[in-house]
């Protein structure tokens, strides 16, 4: 029998899935064109298992160390889990990140790109990568600047041979997110990238309208941080 908290998570998840389907239909897209990355940072396995029981398999975490404490056991129980790193990655954590995560969404600087390239070569295991673009040019936020994005994408793909699948952004909290979603889509289109990781709990429906292929939803499913 589920605890009250777990039941709430399950209900929230169902509601978010319905909102995704409606937003996709409104945008002339199908619901399965949008991948929900359930962001489980700060929440333990007990809150994650209701989603796994419901058949969901795609999750996101911000910190490597936190993820290492809870995901190996969950992955053992559910080998088809797809785990995305959506937070900043320090180069000294690259080895651990490559071992645990299936997708690295926060490739944001040359030093990290080179460290990932070396780790992929040494292990013989590559992970799908997304370039994080700092669309608002915020000094406190990670990500390559929009003006530098094309050159950085070329470096990652052509020189370092990283499997770059798409772009990711986190719009400024005090600006209209649609402007940033449109900018990210434009950068992706001119670089031939199909995947766009954009949109979170407060704006994912708008992100879907602008072509998001992956949305990162945490609090709308799991509630606030614990």
Image (cartoon, rainbow, N blue to C red):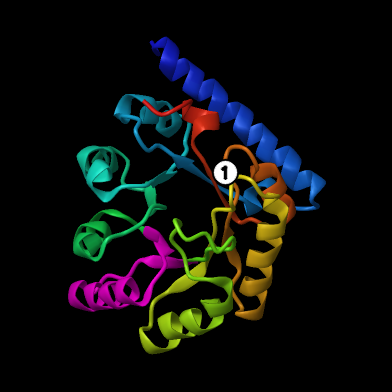
Residue drawn at x 79%, y 50% as measured from the top left: 27
Residue 115 image position (x, y, % from top left)? 26, 74
Closer to the camera in the image, 88 or 218: 88
Q: Is residue 122 magenta?
A: yes
Q: Is residue 20 left or right of residue 66?
A: right
Q: Does the magenta stretch include residue 199?
A: no
Asked if one can make out residue 76 in the rendered structure from this viewpoint, the answer is yes
Residue 155 image position (x, y, % from top left)? 43, 85
Q: In this view, does 19 lie to the left or right of 80?
A: right
**Which span is picked out in magenta?**
103-131
Q: Residue furthest front?
A: 139
Asked if one can make out residue 30 in the rendered structure from this viewpoint, the answer is no
Residue drawn at x 21%, y 39% as measured from the top left: 69
Residue 110 image position (x, y, % from top left)? 36, 77
Q: In this view, does 164 lie above or below 216?
A: below
Q: Quadrant of the N terminus?
A: top left
Within-10-Å neighbours for mark 1: few <14, some 14–19, many 20+: many
Q: How many labels does the image show?
A: 1
Residue pointed to by mark 1 = 200
Residue 88 image position (x, y, % from top left)? 36, 56
Badge 1 element: loop
Q: Is residue 26 above or below residue 124?
A: above
In which image quadrant can residue 91 be found? bottom left
């Amino acid at each position: 029998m589920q605890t009250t908290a777990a039941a709430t998570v399950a209900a929230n998840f169902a509601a978010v899935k319905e909102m995704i389907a409606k937003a996709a239909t409104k945008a002339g897209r199908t619901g399965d064109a949008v991948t929900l990355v359930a962001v489980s940072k700060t929440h333990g396995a007990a809150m994650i298992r209701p989603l796994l029981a419901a058949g969901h398999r795609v999750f996101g975490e911000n910190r490597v160390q936190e993820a290492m404490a809870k995901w190996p056991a969950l992955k053992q129980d559910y080998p088809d889990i797809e785990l995305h790193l959506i937070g900043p990655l320090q180069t000294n954590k690259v080895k651990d990140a490559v071992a645990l995560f299936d997708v690295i969404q926060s490739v944001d600087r040359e030093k990290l790109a080179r460290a990932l390239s070396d780790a992929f070569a040494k292990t013989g295991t590559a992970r799908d990568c997304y370039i994080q673009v700092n669309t608002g040019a915020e000094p406190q936020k990670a990500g390559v600047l929009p003006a530098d994005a094309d050159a950085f994408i070329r470096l990652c793909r052509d020189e370092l041979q990283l499997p770059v699948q798409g772009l990711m952004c986190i719009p400024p909290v005090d600006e209209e997110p649609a402007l940033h979603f449109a900018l990210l889509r434009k950068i992706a289109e001119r670089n031939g990238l199909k995947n766009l990781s954009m949109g979170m709990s407060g704006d994912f429906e708008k992100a879907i309208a602008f072509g998001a292929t992956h949305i990162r939803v945490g609090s709308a499913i799991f509630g606030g941080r614990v």
